[in-house]
Image (cartoon, rainbow, N blue to C red):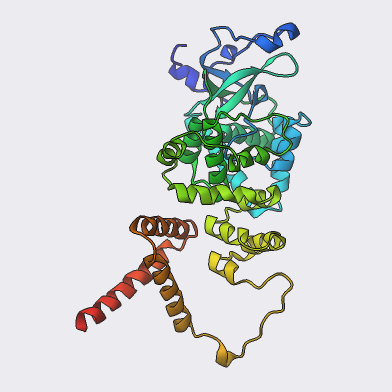
Amino acid sequence: MSKPTREQRQRHDPFNDFEVEKQVQPPPVQESDAQAVRLPEAVSGIELLPPSRMIPDRFQPRPLLPLDIATRFFHGEIDCYEAAQAWMEQAKGEAGMQQQIDQLLSMADTFDEHGQIKAITGSFVPNSSGTYIFQIETGERRFWAACLKHARTRAKQEPNLRVEVIDRPSRYRQVIENRHAEPPTAVAQAREIAALLLEEAGVSPDSGLADPYDYFRQALETRRPHKTWPRIEELMQLSRQRMVQLLNLLNFPTPILETANLNKLPERVLREILNRPESEWEPLVQSAVRDGLTAEEVAAAEPTGAKQKSRSRKNRMLPAQSAIRGLRTFARAVSKVDKKTQGDLLDELADEMMVQGEAHTVLQLLEELGRLLRARVDRF
């Protein structure tokens, strides 16, 4: 395909990176050939497609569409633009969801100035109607950005997106793309690790699964081929211990995982909730979302329905005493493990403080505490 000229790039629709007549038009599939379909050699490279001719990967490691809307969409009850409209309506009562949609709409708006810089990758697969549809491997955020913008503007003409046809879709490529797009949530990381483990074990998704999380949960029980962990460690840049901890989050029921993912609850908070009785999971997750609970606050929370213990002002711990106790507990816990585990724990703690927006405050306090401690150590 020849490179577009300057005149071709000056288009009215920012999603159109090629002339409309160059859109991909795969031939219809005859019903008798549906089980042994082959695409012509011409359908390859970078082409142009409207979103209505595409379908996201239902088992994408990083979920975007809310599960209830996704179920209707993948069952063919609504199209991609109706799904986008329902998503925007549902987001009106969900701050985390609205933020996600705003980010995608912002991405779509940048196409006005820069166009679609990176193509969506995937491959053509036959669908139930006897035609081809482009199944997305990477670039689902760009797909939904276009759908949301189209639903918001109610334009008469569909947008067109650049797609690159590839021979062999890969979970590894999906994870790499996702991690470059934005920092993953704890739940997204759990799905990524599960997807990679299942790919290594040769376990493919069953399209008949009602809940996509059931596919990822298979990683909790699946045998892992030799040297699986080192390959995944290299990509994820996480220790095996941390990946197992993340993977265990999939023991939560799906509604809790959806809430935790949408509101970006930290891994340590979720791990602490997972250690509590199952009857407390839902209320603790809701409290963590509403009140921003830390892992320590979850651990100290009273059991559901228990009477709060009243303490007089006299017996309450002073802030300095509370801080000293916390530092002592931290120092003792970290000093009891080996150097490698210490590094992993400190790395995890630094990640969480960064995600929670507390990194600068903690850094300033620790630097001041270190200065004061150094002065006393040098003096005595």
Quarter of image, res 206: top right
Quarter of image, res 368: bottom left
**Residue at horizontal 58 percent and vertical 90 percent from the top:** 313
Is residue 98 visible in the rendered structure shown here?
no
Above or below residue 208? Residue 193 is below
Q: Is residue 336 left or right of residue 153?
A: left
Percent position (x, y) of residue 118? 48, 28
Percent position (x, y) of residue 369? 33, 75
Percent position (x, y) of residue 178? 51, 38
Frontmost residue, 7 versus 122:
122
Percent position (x, y) of residue 106? 55, 41
**Residue at horizontal 61 percent and vertical 90 percent from the top:** 312
Name of the residue lying farthest toward the right: 77
Above or below residue 137? Residue 190 is below
Quarter of image, res 152: top right
Identify the image quadrant of the C terminus.
bottom left
Above or below residue 335? Residue 187 is above
Q: Is residue 350 left or right of residue 163?
A: left
Frontmost residue, 224 versus 141:
224
